[in-house]
Structures are given as structure tokens and as C-alpha cells.
Image: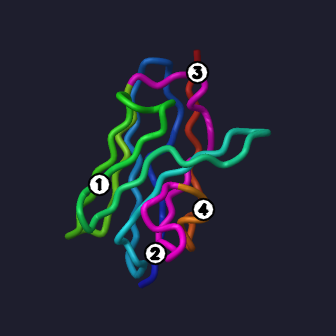
């Protein structure tokens, strides 16, 4: 079954934590990315992992607060989000199927398949 599904979103108070999961069965999961899009803003790459060598990337806005990890046996990538801030409020998307031209980068053009997104709301 081909499946790229995010889960774990919700509403949390500032300073709290959430754990997002991305199930990427049937997709090229050599690289998985987490992106987010807030109302009126462009979609941004916040964290990516290259499962071939374990390399990770974090945007400055989440560095030190978010942690990405992969479980190859379960075809799942998890984004642990701690010390959440109101500005983290957005729809979060996972992406798979890395593109040849975008390999090694954590940008929108780096992935060919996208999940439907999960809402994260951080209240102040």
C-alpha cells in the first residue's frame, strides 16, 4: 500500500511538546522532509533527514527545539517538537521521493511526493 501520512498534530500551549509522525510506505524514503506553512506565508523546510547516512538538517527557527529521527523498519520518520512557540503554528507536511536535482537540500523542489498535512496550533 502506497502511503504518505502525517499524524500527531494538535493544540498545545506555548512551551509544550508534540510528536509528529510520517508513514512513508511505498515511497522512496532515502530522504524525508518536514515542512510547514502558516497562513499567508510560503511553505518552508524545517527539517530533513537523509536515511542513507543519517544526516539531518534543521532550519534556524527550530534548531535546538526539534529533533528528526527515522525508523527504517517501520518506514516512519518522527519529528519531536519541544519548547513550542505560537509562531510554530502551521500546517505541517512530510515529503518523500527525493528529486535528483534537489538531493542533499531541504527545499520544496527537493521532494516529489507530499502528505496531506497535519495542523499544529500553539496557544500563548
Left of 68 or right of it: where is 93? right
Compared to residue 72, the image places residue 83 above or below, namely above
Q: Residues within 10 Å of mark 2 (few under 14, many from 20)?
A: few
State the quadrant of the C terminus. top right
Q: Which residue is painted at 50% across and 77% down in the image?
A: 100
Instruction: Residue under label 4, please give it.
Output: 116
Q: What stretch is highlighted in magenta?
A: 83-106
Q: Distance between the residues labelled 1 and 2?
A: 24 Å
Q: Where is residue 1 in the image (x, y as percent from the top left)?
A: 41, 84
Q: Which residue is painted at 46% across and 75% down in the image?
A: 3
Q: Residues within 10 Å of mark 3 (few under 14, many from 20)?
A: some
Instruction: Residue under label 1, please give it.
Output: 55
Instruction: Residue under label 3, please give it.
Output: 123
Q: Does the CB distance between marks 4 and 2 fall below 8 Å?
A: no
> For the view shown, which residue lies furthest in the left direction?
73
Q: Position of residue 6 (x, y in %)?
A: 48, 57
Amino acid at each position: 500500500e502506497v502511503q504518505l501520512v502525517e499524524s500527531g498534530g494538535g493544540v498545545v500551549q506555548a512551551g509544550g511538546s508534540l510528536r509528529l509522525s510520517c508513514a512513508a510506505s511505498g515511497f522512496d524514503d532515502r530522504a524525508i522532509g518536514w515542512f510547514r506553512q502558516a497562513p499567508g506565508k510560503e511553505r518552508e523546510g524545517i527539517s530533513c533527514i537523509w536515511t542513507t547516512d543519517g544526516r539531518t538538517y534543521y532550519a534556524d527557527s527550530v534548531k535546538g527545539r526539534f529533533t528528526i529521527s527515522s525508523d527504517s523498519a517501520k518506514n516512519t520518520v518522527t519529528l519531536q517538537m519541544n519548547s513550542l512557540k505560537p509562531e510554530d503554528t502551521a500546517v505541517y507536511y512530510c515529503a518523500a521521493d527525493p528529486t535528483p536535482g534537489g538531493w542533499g537540500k531541504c527545499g520544496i523542489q527537493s521532494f516529489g511526493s507530499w502528505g496531506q498535512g497535519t495542523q499544529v496550533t500553539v496557544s500563548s
